[in-house]
Structure formats: C-alpha cells, structure tokens
C-alpha cells in the first residue's frame, strides 16, 4: 500500500532513499560481470555475441541471424494493425516536427578588427540505439531515439534489441524502426550489445555514440565504454512525481502513479499534495486499480518499496521537495500550474494541468521521453538532436589582428612557461 507521511523532514529522508535506490551493494559485483562481458566481446567478437545470447536470452542464433533480414522487416508491416501503424506514423510526425525546431545553427561572426569567429555543427558518423526488450515491447523508444538522430542527419543509425521467443523481434518495434529511419537492426541485447556497438565486430559496425535505456547491466556497460564512444545518459528506473491540490482528481492521479510503477519493480511513484483528504482517496484508488491489473505483481512491488504520498503545508513546500528529488517526470495537477512553474528548477519533463498525463509525453506530444533519472535532472536534459551533434570552433585572424593581440598572447604563454606558444606568435608578427 502507498504510505502517507506528513512531516517534511521524514519526506526528505524518504525522497533521498528513493532517489538512491539504484546504488545497492550488488552494483560492484554487477560491474565486474559487465567488465568481463565487454572484454570477451572485444576479444571474440560475433562468437561472444552468439554465446551470450544463448546464455542470457536462451536463444540459439546463427551468425546470419544476428542482422534482421529485409523479408522480416517487410513482413512486420503485415503483422501490425492499421490502427497501430497510423499511431506510429502520427507519433513519428509529431516527434520529428518538435525536434526539427531544436536543430542548432552553425554561425560565423565577422568582427570589425578582422577577426572571424564561429561555431560549426556536424553529426556523428554512426549512432547506436539500444532498445530494451524483456517485460514489454517499446516502439516508442525506437521513435524517440532514432528520430532525433535522423533529424541531425546522422548517416548511419544502427539498432540493437534483445531477441524474444524463437529469436523474434516484436513487429511493432521493427515497423517503428523503419518509419524512424534506422539503417540496420541486430537481434542482440544486454551488455554484450553495448560492447558490440562500442568496439565493433565483423557483423556489427562500431558506432560513435550509444543512446537508449536498458537494465542495470546495459547501464553499467554504457558507463564503462564511455570515452571509447559517447553516450546519452546513465538511465535508471522510471519515476514520476505529482504535485496536486484539492481540485485534482484522485482517480486520475492513481492511474498516473501506476503508469510509472508498472514499468519496473524499482520504478518510483510519488505524490505531494496540500490536501490530506485527496491523499487518502488516492491511496484507496491505487489499491482498487491494482485489483485486476495485468502487471499487478511487479507494480505492487514498486508501489510498496518506492511509492509515497506526502501531505505538505503549501505548494511552495511541494516545489522545494520536488527540486530536492529532481524527478524524471513531474506532473503539476493544480489549479494554476504556470504560477508554480517558476519555482520548479529540476525536472526532466514537466506536465502542466489535469488533462496532461505523463503518457502523452511517452508517446505522442513530441518532446523526447528519454529523460534524466535518479536526480540527474539537476544537471542533465532530455535526449535531443544535439545529442547526435558535435560542434567545432571556427577562428580566423588577419595579420593585423594578430599583431594587435600578440603582446597579450605572448604574456599569457610566457606566464605559463610555454616558450613555443609565445614564439609561434612572435615569429609571425616580426615577419610583418
């Protein structure tokens, strides 16, 4: 059952405990396992991928089956309903439209003193997308990761995802990948898939950046290969924090909390409310909605361990506690959400008003649903077009401009004891 607490100090302690839930005593042991997997894939390549797929996914594949074939991709369209295909296409259009507005522009500035400065954006050559399998199929994750890469004009987008029963991949995932412009798809998951993308094998090309969420082994693998490749973030279990006042609907709030809890036994579902009566109603409604829930067991685990209701004295206190937690998803189910928005400093995505459940952001609104978790919203942002771009500075000095600045440059170089830095300027200016 969802616990209800009323003391701010206790709330702070509980929010810290929930925020730290991924840092358990097993992490170091898991990291050692992941390190071994990475090293084995680096040494053995495709053979290691097939061996680990048999061991962890219990699927026996041949080398030829690693890459999803064109006939399987074509068949996927015949295996999804028209309603689902239309929804995927609509989502693709809306996500693409949003991300096209976020493309940073290269620029060049010509100063009066004959100095040219600028910034030039270019995409990575290859992006690797990890799409989780296991408990559910995630065509939305495909769209959210692949579309920004294609908007950024990444030439090659490579996707990896764990094989299901019989080595199959859910048709909806394959359709979403094709709609989003994925170039190649491989049926491999776990830390071994991250290793393949980071190091490359004879079958799977090495990429420049790896994005997409996964379990703790995938997350640790991304952490360990960072520096060899870029990564988007270290994604933890999903979380939602709802701030609600007396006008909020307890039935809707309960559904929103369960919408996060059903992801994973470690998902967090938190309500901060100024209304004690609403807190009790939400607590009861969660129990009712769980009765016939198709994912009841894991959802109950999440609610029991990482679910929480806090009754606060004001919306300002709720905002302060929310900023302390820095949630992945923040819902403002209050009469005037825009008034409270100025007090919100840390959140991955903010959903304003009673008609904006977090699910609209997961699927259709357009902004990316790959968001910072476990407090990372204090310093990180959602995945976007810029994730797949890097920028180069542009600098040009005329001889006159170099002469004008030479004294200051040489003084700084000499202060740092870098003789040839100073000489590289002096020799040029003396020639003039």
Image: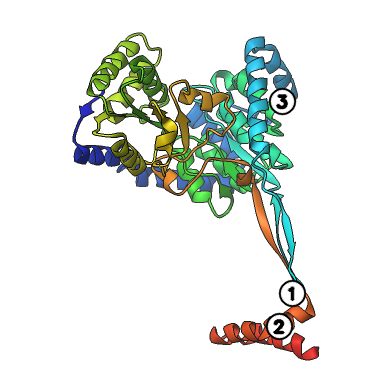
Whole-percent x, y for residue 41 in the image: 56, 44
Q: Residue furthest top?
A: 292
Residue 157 makes an appearance in the image:
no
Is residue 173 shown left or right of residue 261? right
Give the alpha-carbon distance from disc 1 to disc 3, as whole Å: 59 Å
Marks 3/2 in contact by CB < 8 Å: the verdict is: no
Tell me the number on the disc at residue 315: none
Give the alpha-carbon distance from disc 2 to disc 1, as whole Å: 9 Å
Whole-percent x, y for residue 46 in the image: 62, 39
Tell me the element at label 1. Answer: loop
Q: In this rendered view, identify the residue nearer to me: 48 or 101.
A: 101
**Mark whose residue sits in front, 3 or 2:** 2
Quadrant that contains the N terminus: top left
**Mark whose residue sits in front, 1 or 3:** 1
Mark 1 or mark 3, which has the lower sequence index?
3
Mark 2 or mark 1, which has the lower sequence index?
1
Residue for badge 1: 113
Quadrant that contains the C terminus: bottom right
Tell me the element at label 3. Answer: loop
Label 2 crowding class (10 Å Cα cut-off): few <14, some 14-19, many 20+? few
Marks 2/1 in contact by CB < 8 Å: the verdict is: yes
Displayed quadrant of residue 305: top left
Displayed quadrant of residue 119: bottom right
Q: Residue at x 23, y 26 (%)?
A: 3
Q: Residue at x 24, y 37 (%)?
A: 11
Residue for badge 3: 69
Label 1 crowding class (10 Å Cα cut-off): few <14, some 14-19, many 20+? few
Q: Residue at x 43, y 45 (%)?
A: 376
Tell me the number on the disc at residue 404: 2
Residue 241 makes an appearance in the image:
yes
């Amino acid at each position: 059952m969802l616990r209800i607490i009323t003391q701010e100090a206790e709330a702070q302690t509980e929010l810290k405990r929930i925020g730290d839930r991924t840092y358990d005593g097993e992490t170091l042991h898991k990291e050692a396992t992941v390190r071994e997997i990475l090293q084995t894939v680096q040494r053995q390549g495709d053979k290691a991928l097939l061996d680990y797929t048999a061991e962890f996914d219990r699927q026996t594949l041949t080398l030829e089956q690693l890459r999803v074939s064109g006939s399987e991709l074509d068949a996927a369209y015949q295996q999804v309903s028209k309603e689902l295909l239309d929804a995927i296409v609509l989502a693709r259009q809306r996500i693409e439209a949003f991300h096209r507005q976020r493309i940073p522009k290269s620029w060049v500035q010509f100063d009066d003193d004959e100095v040219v400065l600028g910034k030039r954006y270019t995409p990575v050559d290859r992006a690797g997308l990890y799409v989780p399998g296991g408990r559910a199929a995630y065509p939305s994750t495909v769209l959210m990761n692949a579309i920004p890469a294609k908007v950024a004009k990444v030439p090659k987008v490579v996707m990896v995802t764990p094989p299901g029963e019989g080595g199959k991949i859910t048709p909806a995932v394959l359709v979403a990948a094709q709609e989003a412009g994925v170039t190649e798809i491989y049926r491999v998951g776990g830390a071994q898939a991250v290793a393949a993308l980071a190091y490359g094998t004879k079958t799977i090309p090495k990429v420049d950046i790896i994005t997409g969420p996964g379990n703790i082994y995938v997350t640790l693998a991304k952490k360990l290969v960072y520096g060899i490749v870029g990564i988007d973030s270290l994604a933890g279990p999903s979380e939602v924090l709802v701030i609600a006042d007396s006008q909020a609907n307890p039935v809707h709030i309960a559904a929103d909390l369960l919408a996060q809890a059903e992801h994973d036994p470690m998902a967090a579902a938190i309500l901060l409310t100024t209304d004690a009566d609403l807190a009790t109603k939400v607590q009861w409604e969660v129990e009712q909605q769980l009765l016939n829930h198709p994912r009841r067991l894991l959802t109950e685990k999440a609610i029991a361990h990482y679910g929480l209701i806090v009754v606060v004295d004001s919306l300002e206190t709720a905002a302060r506690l929310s900023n302390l937690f820095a949630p992945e998803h923040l819902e403002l189910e209050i009469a005037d959400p825009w008034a409270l928005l100025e007090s919100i400093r840390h959140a991955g995505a903010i959903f304003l008003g009673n008609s904006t459940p977090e699910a609209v952001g997961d699927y259709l609104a357009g902004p990316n649903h790959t968001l910072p978790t476990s407090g990372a919203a204090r310093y990180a942002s959602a995945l976007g077009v810029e994730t797949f771009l890097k920028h180069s500075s542009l600098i040009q000095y005329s001889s006159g401009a170099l002469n004008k600045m030479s004294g200051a440059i040489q003084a700084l170089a000499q202060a740092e004891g870098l003789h040839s830095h100073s000489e590289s300027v002096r020799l040029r200016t003396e020639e003039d």
